[in-house]
Amino acid sequence: MKVFLLICLFIAPALAFAQLRPATGIGSKLIAAHKDTTIESDTSKENKEPRYYYVSLNANAFVNTKGSAAKRFSPAVEFGRTYGIFDIGLATGRLNSLPGHDTSRYIELRPTINVFSKGRFAESLCLGAGYIFSAKQAMMSEICNGINFNVSANFAIAMLQGYVFFDGTNSSRSGQYIGLGLTYNFLKPHSVNKQRKKAAIVSDN
Protein backbone atom coordinates (compact mmCIF):
# COMPACT_ATOMS: atom_id res chain seq x y z
CA MET A 1 0.00 0.00 0.00
CA LYS A 2 2.85 2.38 0.88
CA VAL A 3 4.57 1.58 -2.40
CA PHE A 4 1.35 2.38 -4.30
CA LEU A 5 1.00 5.73 -2.51
CA LEU A 6 4.63 6.62 -3.26
CA ILE A 7 4.11 5.82 -6.93
CA CYS A 8 1.01 8.03 -6.97
CA LEU A 9 2.92 10.90 -5.34
CA PHE A 10 5.60 10.72 -8.06
CA ILE A 11 3.18 10.34 -10.98
CA ALA A 12 0.75 13.13 -9.98
CA PRO A 13 3.27 16.04 -10.22
CA ALA A 14 4.60 14.65 -13.49
CA LEU A 15 1.09 14.60 -14.98
CA ALA A 16 0.38 18.10 -13.70
CA PHE A 17 3.62 19.43 -15.18
CA ALA A 18 2.86 17.77 -18.50
CA GLN A 19 -0.53 19.51 -18.59
CA LEU A 20 0.97 22.93 -17.78
CA ARG A 21 3.52 22.83 -20.61
CA PRO A 22 1.01 23.19 -23.49
CA ALA A 23 -0.62 26.13 -21.68
CA THR A 24 2.76 27.79 -21.32
CA GLY A 25 3.40 27.18 -25.01
CA ILE A 26 0.12 28.82 -25.95
CA GLY A 27 0.95 31.83 -23.80
CA SER A 28 4.34 32.15 -25.45
CA LYS A 29 2.74 31.99 -28.87
CA LEU A 30 0.26 34.71 -27.93
CA ILE A 31 3.04 36.96 -26.66
CA ALA A 32 5.08 36.33 -29.81
CA ALA A 33 2.07 37.06 -31.99
CA HIS A 34 1.51 40.35 -30.13
CA LYS A 35 5.13 41.32 -30.63
CA ASP A 36 4.95 40.51 -34.34
CA THR A 37 1.79 42.61 -34.68
CA THR A 38 3.44 45.55 -32.93
CA ILE A 39 6.54 45.33 -35.10
CA GLU A 40 4.45 45.07 -38.27
CA SER A 41 2.41 48.10 -37.24
CA ASP A 42 5.51 50.17 -36.46
CA THR A 43 7.17 49.31 -39.77
CA SER A 44 4.15 49.93 -41.95
CA LYS A 45 4.53 52.45 -44.76
CA GLU A 46 2.10 54.90 -43.18
CA ASN A 47 3.96 55.02 -39.88
CA LYS A 48 7.27 55.60 -41.65
CA GLU A 49 6.04 59.00 -42.86
CA PRO A 50 7.42 61.85 -40.69
CA ARG A 51 4.89 64.06 -38.95
CA TYR A 52 5.81 67.43 -37.46
CA TYR A 53 4.90 71.12 -37.21
CA TYR A 54 6.58 73.78 -39.33
CA VAL A 55 6.71 77.53 -39.86
CA SER A 56 7.50 79.21 -43.18
CA LEU A 57 8.50 82.79 -43.99
CA ASN A 58 7.68 83.78 -47.57
CA ALA A 59 8.93 86.85 -49.43
CA ASN A 60 6.96 87.18 -52.68
CA ALA A 61 6.85 89.92 -55.29
CA PHE A 62 4.07 90.42 -57.83
CA VAL A 63 5.20 90.56 -61.46
CA ASN A 64 3.57 91.71 -64.72
CA THR A 65 2.07 94.68 -62.90
CA LYS A 66 2.81 98.37 -62.48
CA GLY A 67 3.91 99.96 -59.24
CA SER A 68 6.75 100.50 -56.81
CA ALA A 69 8.60 97.81 -54.87
CA ALA A 70 6.38 98.46 -51.83
CA LYS A 71 3.28 97.85 -53.95
CA ARG A 72 4.69 94.59 -55.33
CA PHE A 73 6.26 93.09 -52.19
CA SER A 74 3.98 90.56 -50.44
CA PRO A 75 5.38 89.05 -47.21
CA ALA A 76 3.65 86.16 -45.44
CA VAL A 77 4.11 83.66 -42.62
CA GLU A 78 2.60 80.18 -42.56
CA PHE A 79 2.25 77.74 -39.68
CA GLY A 80 1.12 74.17 -40.23
CA ARG A 81 1.69 70.45 -39.85
CA THR A 82 3.29 67.91 -42.17
CA TYR A 83 1.87 64.42 -42.72
CA GLY A 84 4.49 62.77 -44.89
CA ILE A 85 4.11 64.28 -48.36
CA PHE A 86 1.07 66.37 -47.39
CA ASP A 87 1.10 69.72 -45.56
CA ILE A 88 -1.82 71.68 -44.18
CA GLY A 89 -1.09 75.23 -43.10
CA LEU A 90 -2.65 78.54 -42.16
CA ALA A 91 -1.00 81.61 -43.68
CA THR A 92 -1.35 85.30 -43.00
CA GLY A 93 0.34 88.28 -44.63
CA ARG A 94 -0.03 91.34 -46.82
CA LEU A 95 -0.62 91.70 -50.54
CA ASN A 96 1.61 94.79 -50.56
CA SER A 97 3.84 96.72 -48.18
CA LEU A 98 2.31 100.17 -48.61
CA PRO A 99 1.82 101.93 -45.26
CA GLY A 100 -1.77 102.42 -44.13
CA HIS A 101 -3.32 99.89 -46.54
CA ASP A 102 -5.50 97.79 -44.21
CA THR A 103 -7.22 96.15 -47.21
CA SER A 104 -4.03 94.23 -48.01
CA ARG A 105 -4.09 91.96 -44.94
CA TYR A 106 -5.32 88.43 -45.50
CA ILE A 107 -5.65 84.98 -43.95
CA GLU A 108 -5.49 81.81 -46.03
CA LEU A 109 -5.78 78.03 -45.70
CA ARG A 110 -3.02 76.37 -47.74
CA PRO A 111 -2.94 72.60 -48.32
CA THR A 112 0.25 71.50 -50.11
CA ILE A 113 1.40 68.20 -51.56
CA ASN A 114 4.85 67.10 -52.71
CA VAL A 115 4.28 65.78 -56.22
CA PHE A 116 7.91 64.76 -56.80
CA SER A 117 11.01 64.28 -54.67
CA LYS A 118 14.59 63.22 -55.36
CA GLY A 119 17.04 63.29 -52.49
CA ARG A 120 17.11 66.79 -50.99
CA PHE A 121 14.99 68.27 -53.79
CA ALA A 122 11.19 68.24 -54.00
CA GLU A 123 8.49 69.88 -56.09
CA SER A 124 5.34 71.02 -54.31
CA LEU A 125 1.87 72.08 -55.43
CA CYS A 126 -0.53 74.11 -53.31
CA LEU A 127 -4.16 75.21 -53.64
CA GLY A 128 -5.12 78.00 -51.26
CA ALA A 129 -8.31 79.78 -50.28
CA GLY A 130 -8.50 82.88 -48.12
CA TYR A 131 -10.12 86.16 -47.16
CA ILE A 132 -8.81 89.73 -47.49
CA PHE A 133 -9.98 91.96 -44.65
CA SER A 134 -12.06 95.04 -45.54
CA ALA A 135 -11.46 94.63 -49.28
CA LYS A 136 -14.06 94.90 -52.04
CA GLN A 137 -12.52 91.84 -53.73
CA ALA A 138 -12.33 89.92 -50.49
CA MET A 139 -12.39 86.33 -51.71
CA MET A 140 -8.92 85.04 -52.48
CA SER A 141 -7.81 81.82 -54.17
CA GLU A 142 -4.31 80.68 -55.07
CA ILE A 143 -2.50 78.12 -57.21
CA CYS A 144 1.24 77.84 -56.63
CA ASN A 145 4.17 75.52 -56.99
CA GLY A 146 7.63 75.48 -55.51
CA ILE A 147 11.04 73.87 -55.93
CA ASN A 148 12.26 72.97 -52.45
CA PHE A 149 15.75 72.15 -51.22
CA ASN A 150 16.20 70.51 -47.81
CA VAL A 151 19.34 72.03 -46.35
CA SER A 152 18.91 69.72 -43.35
CA ALA A 153 16.11 67.88 -41.60
CA ASN A 154 15.11 71.13 -39.87
CA PHE A 155 15.66 73.76 -42.58
CA ALA A 156 14.46 74.07 -46.16
CA ILE A 157 14.48 76.82 -48.77
CA ALA A 158 12.17 77.14 -51.76
CA MET A 159 11.73 79.04 -55.00
CA LEU A 160 8.02 79.88 -55.34
CA GLN A 161 5.78 80.86 -58.25
CA GLY A 162 2.03 81.22 -58.28
CA TYR A 163 -1.19 82.90 -59.32
CA VAL A 164 -3.65 84.67 -57.03
CA PHE A 165 -7.27 85.42 -57.93
CA PHE A 166 -9.38 88.08 -56.18
CA ASP A 167 -13.17 88.03 -56.45
CA GLY A 168 -15.74 90.56 -55.32
CA THR A 169 -19.43 91.22 -55.86
CA ASN A 170 -18.94 93.47 -58.88
CA SER A 171 -15.33 92.95 -59.94
CA SER A 172 -12.41 90.54 -60.01
CA ARG A 173 -8.71 90.54 -60.84
CA SER A 174 -5.67 88.29 -60.75
CA GLY A 175 -1.96 88.52 -60.09
CA GLN A 176 1.21 86.50 -60.60
CA TYR A 177 4.13 86.34 -58.19
CA ILE A 178 7.55 84.79 -57.68
CA GLY A 179 9.41 84.58 -54.42
CA LEU A 180 11.54 82.78 -51.88
CA GLY A 181 10.53 80.75 -48.83
CA LEU A 182 12.40 79.64 -45.71
CA THR A 183 10.93 76.80 -43.65
CA TYR A 184 11.85 75.58 -40.19
CA ASN A 185 10.64 72.12 -39.12
CA PHE A 186 10.01 71.58 -35.41
CA LEU A 187 11.85 68.27 -35.05
CA LYS A 188 13.31 67.27 -31.70
CA PRO A 189 16.90 65.98 -31.68
CA HIS A 190 17.16 62.18 -31.91
CA SER A 191 13.37 61.86 -32.30
CA VAL A 192 11.78 59.18 -34.50
CA ASN A 193 10.27 61.81 -36.81
CA LYS A 194 13.67 63.46 -37.31
CA GLN A 195 15.20 60.09 -38.18
CA ARG A 196 12.39 59.49 -40.67
CA LYS A 197 12.89 62.95 -42.18
CA LYS A 198 16.61 62.31 -42.59
CA ALA A 199 15.89 58.93 -44.16
CA ALA A 200 13.46 60.54 -46.62
CA ILE A 201 16.09 63.12 -47.61
CA VAL A 202 18.94 60.69 -48.26
CA SER A 203 16.92 57.71 -49.52
CA ASP A 204 17.22 58.70 -53.19
CA ASN A 205 20.70 60.22 -53.16
Image (cartoon, helix red, strand yellow):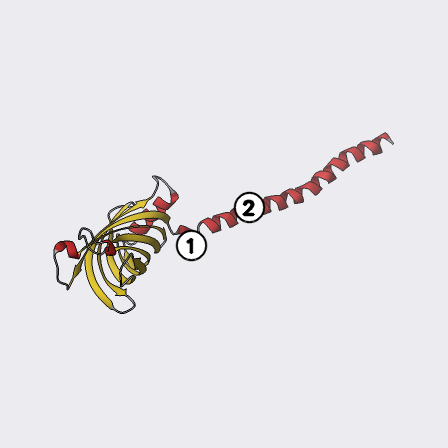
Residue 54: x, y in percent? 32, 48
Q: Amino acid at mark 2?
A: Ala
Place residue 5 in its image quadrant.
top right
x, y percent for residue 79? 32, 49
Name which residue lies at 28% across and 66% down. 167
**Quadrant of res 140:** bottom left
Seen in the image, is 51 located left or right of residue 14? left
Check the image and name the residue furthest to the right.
1
The quarter of the displayed image where residue 12 is located: top right
Quadrant where the N terminus sits is: top right
* For residue 54, above or below residue 143: above
Element class at badge 2: helix
Q: Which mark is residue 86?
A: none
Amino acid type at mark 1: Glu
- Residue 185: give x, y in percent of width and height: 31, 46
Most foreground residue, 181 or 31: 181
For the point 45% across and 49% down, the residue is 42
Instruction: Report the residue marked by disc 2.
Output: 32
| Extreme residue toward the bottom, this view | 170
* Residue 203 shows up from this direction: no
Label 1: element kind: helix
Q: Nearer the viewer, residue 34 or 179?
A: 179
Q: Residues within 10 Å of mark 2 (few under 14, many from 20)?
A: few
Instruction: Name the residue rendered at 26%, 64% in the picture.
Output: 166
What is the x, y in percent for residue 6? 80, 31
Query: Which of pointers 2 and 1 indicates the residue nearer the eye?
Result: 1
Q: Is residue 9 left or right of residue 71?
A: right
- Residue under circle 1? 46
